[in-house]
Image (tube, grey):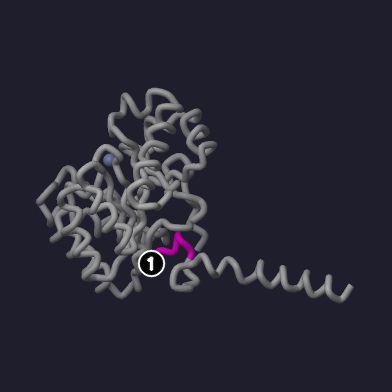
Amino acid sequence: MLMRKRLILFVLAILLISPLSHTEAATPRAYNDRSLIYLTFDDGPHRQTGALLDVLKKHKVKATFFILGNNIKGNEKMLRRIVAEGHLIALHGMTHDRHKFYRTPTTAVREMQDVQRRVFQVTGVKSNIVRTPYGSDPYMTLAHRRAMTKAGFQMWDWNIDSLDYRYKTDNRRVQNQVFARLDANYKARIASIILTHDHSITPTALDYIIRNAKAKKRGYAFRTLQGLKNPHNFFNKWKPHR
Ligand SMILES: [Zn+2]
């Protein structure tokens, strides 16, 4: 009987301790803490990815890369470097063709399974974190969402669009856009998930964004989307709880 009691206490202790082991650097912050920034890069790997990785390394910042399956061939080394430097690999489909990807719920799931397999073959990492091409709005129907969830994928959109694909090398406009939205999220007390692209954001703009976010007296910290529950996406509006 005593043994059993001890066993129950032991199990309870483990249950109490275990959530801590999932947090990064044992910080008590929730993912929707307004001082957290999640940098995300879509559509890579790309020839510019290396320069972006250099900037992240310089600032000791980890980010999330949503990989496009059709861009892996010839860029395998870069994909492995992303993993080796501690960033999170996530999935962005194969074709980036909205007609092909969203044609049916099955085509969407298949593209994610394809890129998942290819990423695994190259890096040994099996990711189930996905961002669908152009984000979930407006092409993801309820049937698409259900199929994706049933296949075990966790879908993430963003709440700051850097507009890097529009402004390209016009760094100041990208930077202004990001900091205007960062201020808005801070006021709204929500974390920031920033959308950028390997092929569009310049290393200079990335460097500026990280440096100036860190310089603000808001205690900003950068995280990957690893291990988070309740993904933020456009159809499942996240509720800030602070
Ligand atoms: Zn994309």
Counting other residues with Cα less than 10 Å from the Cα at mark 1, is it few (<14), some (14-19), or many (20 or more)? many
- The quadrant of the rendered image in which ligand 1 is seen is top left
Residue at left offset 14%, top offset 46%: 167
Q: Secondary structure at mark 1?
A: loop
Q: Position of residue 59 (x, y in %)?
A: 24, 70
Depth check, front residue: 19 or 10: 10
Picture coordinates of residue 223, whole percent (x, y) = 37, 63
The amino acid type, in three-letter code, at marker 1 is: Ser
Specify the farthest residue to the right: 1
Who's the residue at 38% across and 33% down the image? 111
Assess mark 1: CB under 8 A from ligand 1?
Answer: no
Residue tagged by mark 1? 35
Residue farthest along the left direction in this orientation: 169
Front-most of residues 94 and 104: 94
Closest to the observer, 218 or 78: 78
SS majority, magenta? loop
Is 120 a magenta residue?
Answer: no
Q: Residue at x 36, y 40 (%)?
A: 115
Q: Tell me if residue 186 comes above or below residue 100 in the rendering.
A: below
Q: Compared with residue 132, is residue 158 higher up or lower down, i.e. above or below?
A: below
The answer to which quarter of the image holds residue 116 is top left
Residue 203 on image: x %, y % = 15, 59
Q: Which residues are magenta?
A: 30-34
Left or right position of 205 against 238: left
Residue located 47% across and 45% down the image:
154
Q: Quadrant of the N terminus?
A: bottom right
